Structures are given as structure tokens and as C-alpha cells.
Image (cartoon, coloured by chain):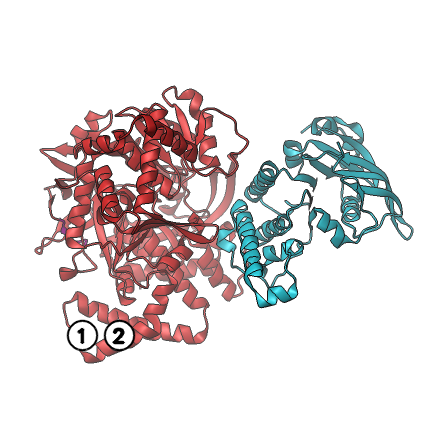
Chain colours: A red, B cyan
Amino acid sequence: MKADTLPRLLLENYQKYGANKVAMRRKDLGLWYEYTWKDSYESVKYFFYGLLSLGLKPQDKVAIIGENDPEWYWAEYAAQAAHAIPFGIFVDSHHEELKYYLEHSDSTFVVAHDQEQTDKCLGLIDELPKLKKIIYWDPKGLWTYDDPRIIYFYEVLKLGKEYEKTHRGLFEEMVEKTKEDDIACFCYTSGTTGLPKAAMLSHSCIVETARNWFAIDPWYPTDEYLSYLPPAWAAEQFLGITGGMLSAITVNFPERAETVQENMREIGPQIVFYSSRLWESTASLVQAKITDTIKIKRFLYNLFIPIGNKVADMRFDKEKPNLLWRGLRFLGEWVLYRPLRDKIGMRDIRYGYSSGAAISPEMIRLFHALGVNLKSLYGLSETGINVIGRDENFSPDVTGNALPNSEVKVNEDGEIIIRSKSMLKGYYKNPAAYEEKVKDGWFHTGDFGYIDEKNRLTVIDRIEDMRELKTGTKFSPQFTEIRLRFSPYIRDGLTLGGKDRDFVSAIININFENMGKWAEARHIAYTTFVDLSQKEQVYDLILQYIQRVNKVLPEGARIKKFVNLHKEFDADEAELTRSRKIRRSFVEERYANLINAIYSDMDQIVVDAPVTYRDGRTGVIKTAVSIKKVPEV
Amino acid sequence: MEKILRVNHIDLSFGGVQVLMDISFEMEERSIYAIIGPNGAGKTSLVNCINGFYRPQKGEIYYKGHQINKLPSHKIAKLGVGRTFQQIELYTGLTTVENLLAGRHILFKSGMAAGALYFGKARREEVEHRKAVEEIIDLLEMEHIRDEVVGNLSYGLRKRVELGRALAMEPKLLVLDEPMAGMNVEEKEDMVRFVLDIYDLKGTSILLIEHDMGVVMDISHTVVVLDFGIKIAEGTPSEIVKNPEVIKAYLGTKGTKGA
């Protein structure tokens, strides 16, 4: 019988590969340590027994909060083997968020990474009567804690070894009994609207997603993957945790969040999944470093990038490049593209995936020029991965075709609806939300898009974010914003406009590092972000860029006025979600005075913005922000 | 039980300038001891006497019962007294790892010839020392700057490497001269956490010169206050903060709230 639950797949991989293949690698103390399938299997098995000995029951929820490490994965697999339900929590969750997750889920165990996460949980444990134990896997700083409610991961393994002696064979028995309809994990959705909901995903949901994906883009056991995406995010569930188990690739864990770039270069993975923001900042980084580097490298870049772009365009248009272009590209591969890819850790990449929000076509083209097969993905925590760009009919302007076993349609309102075998079983303790989203078996995504004659989906924006001006012109803020972000000097842009407004305007967050370098190169002195953002020269630079973007927008959607905001949007101040999407309604309310000023005749406004500092104190910043008109070019 | 450090009636002067006058105090093993005082009070001079950079004209200093005030500073270091400096003393042309390995110098047993030829024993020793250095890198969260040349690092990170360098020699007594100077709130919190981690993990005794009263109050067991070269108070943080002499020295004669 085909193995279709994660624990059974683990058993299968263990029987097939044993100690002969590396399942995971972790970098510690400067060296890469390897764990074979046998090592992984045993860790999962003993953690399973350890959890049982501490009182874990079937259907219990196990929260896991920490950065990517083998222990994170092992905890999930072990919980599943015990017929319990694991789920991830973002590591930068603060007090209220953490309390909500732990309370709402009725968690009985928390597997916490380190002192920071353990401290947070200890601060809440008295308010959470169901919580039995906090299990930590990085003991740094916890040596002197003597609270009986916390216990070291490797102590639990020891307990597990003891427990096995009196319960031989229980692990294999319970693994065999796992069924594809068992809930494999919860995925809390990102909550841009309202409190996060817990999507309940069964084994069949996630394994199906991986299987259908590999039918289009196969992964081979020899592939390498770097696990750095927060496992609390559904993407990593589908990719590393499930896809990794199904395809038996080697999953590598970085040393620390700060060393991910370096570790990418060391591993050179075949499969890379970046959020669209991360692709953007990688491109930004490349562009910024090119402006900083020696003349000859700049020369080669400026010479070969257009060639790469041309060849990429030819491929997109299904035009076979002739011998001249193929030759030039071959030359470019060895002179520029390959060394440059090596610098960003993508020398041997086979698939580059982007998801989370839309990505600009220029971005896709740039990466294809460099030899990165970058394609978009579309899917939701609730429905799995449903749409992938196909090599045979690839175009940077569309998202892609539906995967096998996924049906994707657009209804009369222009909303994308999905029906797939990998759909959620429901929302935990929230059947009303399920009724709202799933009608006649179709999940209503809340995204706006359209399907072309080749059955390719293009995702434009969230429906609720599509805007209409007083003039009746409809525009998609996101469409404009992703094009704004393509500039290395713009970190974020928020386009504004509504039924009571005549034109579109924008609030820009400059990219402090890149803009700073630009200013220094021109001997423009500046002190803080506030100071830099308000400089005349900076405004002029941004103005020119906005004019470029305006050229590709329909007349009514063009930006007529803009401001450089005096501060960056911040997730800690709830202006962004944890996955760095702007929370529009919140931000528009908070900056209402500024927005009113933009739509008036003022060319400057003094702003009072409340801020929350890193140590929890609140304060107010007062500064004058300039408002600039964007003339037609 | 022998105190880890005993400073006994020391006087220090440079020509006509009296820098320290009759300073005495004792430090218990496994404790955190803070020296505070206004600028120019003689704190760094006191600590320089402990390390053997200055020779007091009168009095003695005992480390674990040994008299050390007449010893050269490298011998004092060998006994187990580590030190960080206000002006960071690192090799700016070397990387973080290389600086830390240099800090292990006194613990290397192989001689120059063995090191040059790099036979079995020398190689094994090198690996051991590299492991010890990596553990410090892990403790102080410096993986991402491991191979970065120190000259390219920011001030806050350099201070961290400096702390690592002092740790590398496995000191029993660690003397920190304003380890948090020039840092923002977040960097300070990290630094305090590292100091406490070192204290918890290795049981090192820590002698700390510090201006940030919050830090001093939070982590020290005993505080000694200097002003114009004289010890004006000694006690627990809560005693010191109420001491009228201390208040006068720092803030003049107007009253103040306790911390």
C-alpha cells in the first residue's frame, strides 16, 4: 500500500536508505554535521516515546516555535506518529500573539527553540492550564533554570529510550495506524483580516500537494535544499517538511538566520523558494553591489545582462535563439551569469520559486537572464499549491497552469476559486469561517485574477484591495507597487486612491542602505532615516523612478503625487503582517492626516507618528514630510 | 576560602598627580563586582594595576593568594586574569576567528618548531583550540562575522570580538573595562546577556567597570565607588544607590531618586 502519511513515509525512507544516505545536515560550530535517515528515524522515535511518557495523548496539539533546525522537523513527525497535531508559531510573535495561538489551539506541549522562546512561554504558562511542558532544544542560557515545567529535548529522548523498553513496537504500530485523513498539522493563516484561523490539513492534503508538484517539477533524492523559510508558514510545510520527506532529498539547516546567504553559497541547493520580497531584495542586492564594484565587473554586467535579457525574451516568445545569441549567452554564462549566481548561492539551481505576493515581470526576466529558472507559484495554506508556471508555455506576465488534481476557476466577480484534493478539512473551532469560504466544494480565495486561452492563471491582487477612483477608473494597487519595488532604492510603496479621490498617489518607503550608499557617493550628508528620506535629491530620484513606472500604467492609474515616508512600515507596530505584507486599512487609518494633506494643496505636512521602540517604550516622532507632484513626461 | 582578588592599601601616582589613594577591597570567587565612579575617578588606573600595566607605589594585590603587583602583565594573564579594554585592542587586519585564536596563545603547548612543521600533536592541538574558539563564537553569536576582518566591523561588533578574545584564554577572573560603552539599547541588552551567560556557564568571576547604572544595579553583587582616587563607598547595589556620598559625587549636592 502506498505510504501516504508523513510518519509512514519516514518509516519507508528509513527502511530504504538506513544509514546510507544523508537526510539532514546542520551547521554547528562552523562545521556541517550529518544525520542519516537512521539518525532521523531514531530521533523521531525516541521523541515520540518521550512525549508519550510525559503524557501526550492522541488529538493533543503540540505547538512548535523556533528557527529551522532538525529538532523542529523531528518534533512534528513525532507528534504525528503519536496521532497528535503539531503546528508552528512564528518566532517573532509577541506576548499577545503567542497567548492567542497557545490558547486557541488548546496546546498541551510547546517545543520551543531557545531561551528567548522558552522565556516567552514561561511568562504565559500560568494563564494556560492545558499546557503541560515546555521542551527546548538549544540549552544556551537555560543552564541555571530549575523550573520543573521546562525540559531539554535530549532529556526527552532519554526518557523515550526508557519508555521504549516497556512499550516495544508501539512506535511502528502507531505509525502503521496513521491514516491519510488524520489531521497532520494546523496552519494558522496570516491574518491580514481579523484573528488568525487554524486551517486543519490532513496528511492527504500535504502529501497530495507534493505529489502533484513533483509530477510537473520532479525532485530527486540527490537534490539539496536549504530549510530557512519559517516552518510556521504553510510554504515550508509543503516544501521541506512534506516535499522533503516524499522525495528523500537532503534538507540542510542553516547555522543562524543571519548566515542563510552564506549557507546558501556553501550548499548550492537545486530547489530554492523565496518569497517575492526576497527575490526583490536579492535583485536589489545584486544591483547595489554592482554599483559598488570595480569598473570591469560593472562593464561586464552592463554588457551581458542585456544579452541575457534578450535571450530570455526570445525563450518567452518561443523564438529559438540563433547561433549568435546562443554563443553570446554561452560566453555570458562563464563570464558573468555563473559567477554571479554563485555569489547568491544559486549556481546549481534547477527551480526557483516565488510566492506570497505578485512579482514584477522585470524581476523574473532578470533572473532568467542570469540562468535562474524562476517561476511563480500560487496556492494557499488552505488549498495547497495549485498553480505553477510551466516550462513549456512560460511567460513572465502570467502565474501558470493548474497542477494535476487542482481545479482553478474565476467566477463572475473575477474571484479565483479553487477545488483540489489538497483542501483543508476545516478551520479548528470555526466552522462558520469554513462555510463562508467554501461553497459547493470551491474555496473562495479572495484574490482577483483572470485565465487566458492557454488556461494560464494571472493573479492580480486581493479583491478587497482593488480600488476604484471617483472617476470610475479601477486600478490594482499591488500591480503598481510591485513595479515600484523593482527599484533598489524603494523598499515599499503604498498606492492610495478611492471612491472619494480623483487620482492615485503613493507613500514610499526608501531603502535606507541602498539610498544611503547613493547619497554617500554623491557627497550628500545625512544622519537618520528621517533626514535622508526628506532630502531634495532623494525626492528627485524617486520622482524619476515613479515617472518610469507611470509609463507602463494605464492613464487613470498613474501616480500624480507622492511622499517619502519618514519611517519604514514596521511589523512590530502592526503596520505589516509577519510575512511583511502591508496592512492597508490599518496604515491608511493611522496616516489619515498625511493622506488628507496629499489630496489637498499642501506641499508639506508636519507629522506626529506614534512609535513603539524595541524595548517596548512608546514615543512620538514629529517631522515635516514633503509632498511632491509627479508631472507628466 | 581564599578570595579571588584582594587589593590591599594601594597608592598610585604619576609624578605629582595622585591617582589612587589607599584603595582596598576584596572580591569573592564566582561573583560579579562593579567599580563605578565619575570620569577621572581612577577606575581604569585601578584595573591597570591589577593587570600589571601600572605599578602601585605602595600596597599589594593578591590573586588567589599570589602576590601579583610586582609581576609582568603576561605572567598575570597566564595565571588566569583576562581583560577587555576601553579602546579595543584587536588585530584589525585579522579575522574574528584569527583574533580569538591569538587569544588562546598562552594555552598553546606546542612550540614554534612543532607548529611550523604541523605534525600530529600540533595539528590535534590546533583542532582543539579551534573548537574552543568556535564555542565562544557560538556563545557570543558571532557566526556571521566569523571570517570577517575585524577592521571592517562596526563598533558594537568589535566590542563583542574583544570580549571573545578575553574569553579565549579561559580566565578565572575577567576584568571588563566599560564593555557597554557606545552601544544602543539592543546591543547593551545583548552584551549583558553574554556576560551573564559567561558567568552562568563558566563560573568566571567578573570585575566590571561600567557607567550604565541600570546594568550595574541589575547584575552586580557588590559595588565599589571611586571618586578622585578614593574609595568612597562599597556595598550591595541597593545600599550604594542610597549612599549620600555616592549621590554627592555623581550628582552634586541636589538630591535624587534612587534607581
**Magenta region, residue range:** A399-403
Tag 1: Cα neighbours inside 10 Å, few (<14), some, or many (≥20)?
A: some
Q: Residue furthest right?
A: B16
Q: Is residue A15 magenta?
A: no
How far is mark 2 from mark 1, CA to CA? 10 Å
Horizontally, residue B88 falls left or right of residue A153, namely: right
Q: Which residue is mark 2?
A: A329
Placement of A223 over or under B227, stated as above or below: below
**Amino acid type at mark 1:** Pro
B205 shown above or below A215 = above
Q: Are the two marked residues, 2 and 1, in contact with CB atoms closer than 8 angstroms?
A: yes
Q: Secondary structure at mark 1?
A: loop
**Could you tell me which chain the residue with mark 1 belongs to?**
A
The residue under label 1 is A321
Side of A441 relative to B199 (left or right): left
The quadrant where residue A550 appears: bottom left
Q: Amino acid at mark 2?
A: Arg
Q: Is residue A452 visible?
A: yes
Residue A163: percent from the left, percent from the top? Answer: 35, 27
Give the residue at x 20% y 46%.
A210
Task: Name the quadrant containing residue A112.
Answer: top left
Q: Quadrant of the N terminus of chain A?
A: top left
Quadrant, the C terminus of chain A: bottom left
Residue A632 in sight from this viewpoint: no
